[in-house]
Image (tube, rainbow, N blue to C red):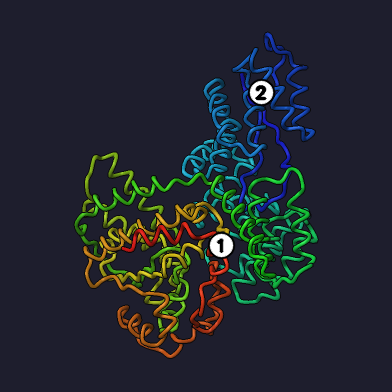
């Protein structure tokens, strides 16, 4: 029995960067024993008319009589996915593949659902198989490209989509995904060209305008960013990502029309949990501006809960990983050596701990280029750890460390733009310090920190893209992750004395010149007065700190979590009980 694909429309608007494309389901065969074609078609018609819950009920009734009928399996999976229940949808799609064997729709459905669950490695595997069986299917190609983008495999994203562009298969969705990949590769003019070329539908044009706003914000032009976000919402008032982005560059007063528009939109039926999360983060910003702190915190709490549920983060997974890393790297690994045209500096720490400011200070030195947050080390280390597990190794061998050096150097080289020193400021590279210092003996590591409660609060306020900071959306998880990270960094410090520089953000902002000079000296760079003026840097800043670091170095007089002390009492107690 073969799958015959058709597509379902999405009921709620959200950015192509934050969702996989629509599910594919099998159409009904002719006569199917106790279930007739008419019965299946009736259930399918309910689905196609947007009556998703009713369609699911009908499919479940049919499944009692024909549990392994392909269209019934696929319809149950598709309906559950539409209802934001991907974990419940997955077994139906997996059973469909078991019953009928490999097909492009079957692999696509599993891949797209795994994408929803942020299981990107598994998603990519199934999506590749789907494309092998249906190489011209643009929906499948776009979804794999989105998957690569979320994994930080931006070069792979560009390469995959470029094949379609060369064959003339260009759509607004494709251009938006390609533009985002180029944006993360810091190819901003090329990214802008992609976004400006989107003209095929109001929804894709709205996404393009939102991306242009983000690009303008990264370049320090908040007014232009605001104009693009407003254009996006004129084209598509339901685009939740544009609402959240607009809130970041808007100063609200009571009765602000955008605040009221977001409140109305949040009450609309059919909004996905992802869209609800975006709007709640935006409303937190708006209500905080007008100093309605209790209302603001409720929106923030709801937004974080929705993100936490969507990602399904468990701190136990990171506890196991960190413990494993301490065992694998209980002593320095063999060092790798080869000629390279650049020397890396890795800035690590929790997100929002001052990594961007540190990068901008160092970029004031001659011969230094900041590459932003590169995903390459995480991808390479996941492969290395898996390889070691399969081989039964308890520690990496010299050949593996040398291969790690070669792979990362090749990936990082285009980002150096000919400069002799390259900075990778991916914060969570703190997990891989043992491997990175073995692979790059010439490298230096900067470990940035902030007071724990300040850092956790700063994380909690941000709606990050992707799932890489899953710990951020629950205060207890964020606090436990911070303790894990501090313990691991102490382990690395003991293994590599003199090669890791600790930079306390609070001390840096209190005495900028003393700490900036110590930082520059540690990195073996030539001091420049530009190091004290990161706000003069003209390079784009692609992180959540883009607006803050456009200002001169400043020390915050009071913690911005002060209005929320009652809500954060449990967090304070946790750190009081873990002073180390």
Say what secondary structure mark 2 lies in: helix
Q: Position of residue 246 (x, y in %)?
A: 69, 66
Give the image quarter of residue 434: bottom left
Mark 1 is surrounded, within 10 Å at the Cα level, by few (under 14), some (14 to 19) or many (20 or more) other residues, namely: some
Residue 461 numbered tag: 1
Residue 110 numbered tag: none
Pick the residue in front: 214 or 285. Answer: 285
Q: Earlier in the sequence, mark 2 or mark 1?
A: 2
Q: In this image, 459 relative to 406: left or right?
A: right
Residue highlighted by disc 2? 71
Say what secondary structure mark 1 lies in: loop
- Relative to 91, is 19 above or below? below
Q: Do the numbered discs 2 and 1 sit on residues whose CB atoms are within 8 Å?
A: no
Foreground: disc 2 or disc 1: 1
Question: Would you say residue 193 is visible in this rendering?
Answer: no
Give the alpha-carbon distance from disc 2 to disc 1, as whole Å. 43 Å
Residue found at x 48% / y 81%: 555
Residue found at x 74% / y 16%: 37
Residue that lies at the very extreme toward the top in this rendered image: 33
Q: Position of residue 488 (x, y in %)?
A: 30, 58
- Relative to 444, is 52 above or below? above
């Amino acid at each position: 029995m073969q799958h015959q694909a058709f597509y379902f429309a999405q009921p709620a608007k959200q950015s192509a960067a934050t969702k996989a494309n629509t599910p594919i389901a099998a159409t009904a065969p002719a006569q199917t024993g106790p279930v007739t074609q008419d019965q299946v078609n009736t259930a399918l018609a309910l689905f196609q008319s947007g009556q998703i819950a009713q369609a699911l009920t009908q499919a479940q009734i049919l499944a009692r009589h024909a549990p392994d009928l392909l269209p019934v399996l696929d319809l149950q999976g598709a309906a559950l996915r539409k209802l934001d229940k991907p974990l419940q949808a997955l077994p139906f799609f997996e059973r469909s593949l078991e019953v009928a064997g490999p097909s492009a729709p079957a692999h696509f459905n599993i891949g797209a659902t795994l994408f929803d669950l942020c299981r990107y490695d598994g998603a990519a595997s199934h999506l590749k198989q789907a494309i092998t069986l249906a190489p011209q299917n643009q929906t499948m190609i776009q979804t794999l490209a989105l998957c690569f983008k979320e994994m930080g495999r931006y070069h792979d994203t560009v390469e995959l989509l470029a094949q379609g562009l060369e064959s003339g298969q260009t759509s607004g969705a494709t251009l938006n995904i390609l533009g985002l990949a180029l944006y993360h590769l810091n190819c901003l003019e090329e990214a802008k060209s992609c976004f400006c070329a989107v003209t095929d539908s109001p929804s894709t044009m709205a996404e393009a305008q939102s991306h242009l706003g983000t690009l303008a914000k990264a370049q320090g032009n908040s007014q232009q960013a605001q104009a693009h976000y407003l254009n996006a919402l004129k084209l598509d008032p339901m685009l939740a990502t544009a609402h959240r982005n607009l809130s970041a560059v808007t100063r609200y007063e009571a009765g602000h029309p955008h605040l009221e528009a977001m409140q109305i939109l949040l009450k609309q039926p059919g909004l996905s949990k992802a869209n609800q999360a975006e709007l709640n983060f935006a409303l937190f910003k708006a209500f905080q501006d007008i100093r309605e702190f209790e209302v603001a915190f409720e929106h923030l709490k709801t937004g974080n809960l929705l993100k936490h549920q969507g990602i399904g983060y468990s701190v136990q997974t990171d506890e196991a990983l960190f413990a494993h890393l301490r065992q694998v790297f209980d002593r320095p690994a063999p060092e790798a050596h080869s000629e390279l045209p650049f020397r890396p500096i890795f800035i690590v720490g929790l997100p929002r701990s001052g990594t961007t400011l540190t990068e901008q200070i160092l970029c004031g030195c001659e011969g230094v280029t900041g590459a932003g947050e590169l995903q390459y080390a995480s991808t390479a280390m996941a492969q290395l750890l898996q390889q070691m597990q399969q081989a039964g190794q308890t520690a990496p061998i010299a050949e593996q460390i040398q291969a790690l050096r070669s792979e990362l150097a090749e990936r990082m080289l285009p980002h150096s733009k000919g400069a002799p020193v390259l900075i990778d400021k991916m914060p969570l590279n703190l997990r891989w310090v043992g491997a990175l210092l073995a692979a790059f003996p010439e490298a230096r590591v900067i470990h940035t920190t902030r007071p724990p409660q300040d850092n956790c609060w700063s994380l909690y306020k941000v709606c990050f893209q992707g799932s890489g900071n899953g710990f951020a959306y629950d205060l207890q998880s964020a606090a436990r992750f911070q303790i894990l990270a501090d313990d691991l960094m102490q382990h690395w410090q003991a293994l590599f004395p003199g090669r890791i520089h600790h930079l306390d953000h609070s001390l840096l902002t209190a005495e900028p010149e003393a700490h900036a000079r110590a930082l520059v000296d540690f990195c073996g760079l030539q001091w420049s007065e530009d190091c004290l003026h990161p706000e003069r840097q003209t390079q784009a800043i692609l992180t959540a700190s883009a607006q803050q670091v456009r200002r001169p170095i400043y020390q915050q007089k009071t913690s911005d979590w002060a209005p929320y002390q009652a809500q954060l009492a449990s967090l304070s107690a946790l750190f009081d009980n873990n002073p180390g």
